[in-house]
Every structure is written in structure tokens, then in C-alpha cells.
């Protein structure tokens, strides 16, 4: 039960880290969008005074916004990859720790089983020795009784033949 609880807790922590990373990047992206909207609210444009002659104007490439958005997306992807890599490494460490714990418990169980087998073998050996000793005692008793019976029978045969 503890093993399952540990695994569920580890999985929940990994999921919460991933959810936190997604939340962080989403909130970061939303904050950047809000700042962009505020830039146009405070300024008052007076286009008549700002216009220059066509020869003096400087032109800006339209791809800059797309490139910066692509760079931001790439940065976010790299950040997400780093967070994911950290999460995977943490998960690997937890799995390795769990495997070590399982191996240690398996070794302990094997040692206990080995000790139990040795104890059982010792008891069986003692029981066998005790049974052999009792069998030997019974055999001696039977032999003595048989000899006594034979003597008694020889003695009664001698008395009968006289």
C-alpha cells in the first residue's frame, strides 16, 4: 500500500510541476499581450506634425514582428523543454530510488526465507535424530524381550521334555 501511495504521490508531483510550467508560460504570454495593448492607450497621435517627406522616411520590415513572435515561441519551447527535462530527471530519480528500495526489501525477504529454511532443516535434523534414537531404543527393547521370550520358551520346552 505504501508503494502505491509513493508512486501516486510522485506522479501527482510530476503532473503538478508540468501544470505549473504550462500555467507560468500561459500567464507570461498573456502578460506580454496586455502590455502591448496599453502602449496605444496613452499616446496622442498628431499625424500632421509627424509626417516627413517621402524621401526622408525610414521603412521598417514587416517580418520583424513575425520573427520576434517566432523567437518568443522558440524561447518558450526551449523553456518548456528544460522544465520537461527536469521533470523527467526527477521522475527517473524517484524510479531509481523505488527500484533500490524494492531490491533491498527483496534481499531482506530472501535472507529471512533462507534463515527460515535453515531453522526448519535444523528442526527436521533434530527430529530425525530423536526418531532414530527412539527406534534404536525400541529395537533394543524388542531384542531383549525376544531373548527373554526365547529363554522362557526353551526353559518350558526342557521342562516339558523331562
Image (spheres, rainbow, N blue to C red):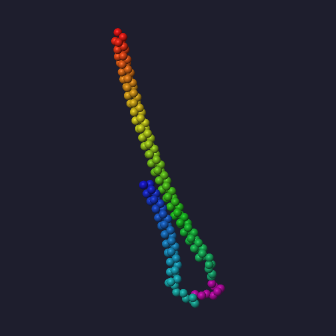
Give the residue at x 51% y 56%: 92
Residue 150 figure quarter: top left
Main SS of residues in magenta:
loop
Residue 126 pos. (x, y %)? 40, 33
Q: Residue furthest bottom?
A: 48
Is 131 colored magenta in this rendering? no
4 or 154, which is in the foreground?
154
Give the residue at x 48% y 63%: 15
Give the residue at x 41% y 38%: 119
132 or 68, which is in the foreground?
132
Residue 32 pos. (x, y %)? 51, 75
* Vertical comparison of 78 with 131: above or below: below
> Considering the image in quadrants, where does the N terminus appear?
bottom left
70 or 139, which is in the foreground?
139
70 or 10, which is in the foreground?
10
Residue 47 figure quarter: bottom right
Q: Which residues are magenta?
A: 50-57
Residue 40 pos. (x, y %)? 52, 83
Amino acid at each position: 500500500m505504501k508503494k502505491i501511495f509513493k508512486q501516486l504521490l510522485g506522479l501527482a508531483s510530476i503532473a503538478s510541476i508540468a501544470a505549473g510550467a504550462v500555467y507560468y508560460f500561459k500567464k507570461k504570454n498573456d502578460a506580454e499581450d496586455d502590455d502591448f495593448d496599453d502602449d496605444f492607450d496613452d499616446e496622442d497621435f498628431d499625424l500632421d506634425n509627424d509626417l516627413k517627406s517621402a524621401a526622408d522616411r525610414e521603412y521598417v520590415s514587416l517580418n520583424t514582428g513575425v520573427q520576434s513572435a517566432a523567437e518568443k515561441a522558440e524561447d518558450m519551447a526551449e523553456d518548456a523543454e528544460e522544465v520537461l527535462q527536469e521533470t523527467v530527471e526527477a521522475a527517473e530519480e524517484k524510479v531509481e530510488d523505488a527500484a533500490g528500495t524494492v531490491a533491498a526489501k527483496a534481499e531482506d525477504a530472501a535472507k529471512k526465507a533462507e534463515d527460515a529454511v535453515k531453522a526448519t532443516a535444523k528442526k527436521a535434523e533434530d527430529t530425525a535424530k530423536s526418531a532414530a534414537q527412539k527406534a534404536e531404543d525400541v529395537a533394543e527393547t524388542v531384542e531383549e524381550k525376544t531373548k527373554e521370550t526365547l529363554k522362557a520358551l526353551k526353559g518350558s520346552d526342557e521342562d516339558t521334555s523331562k
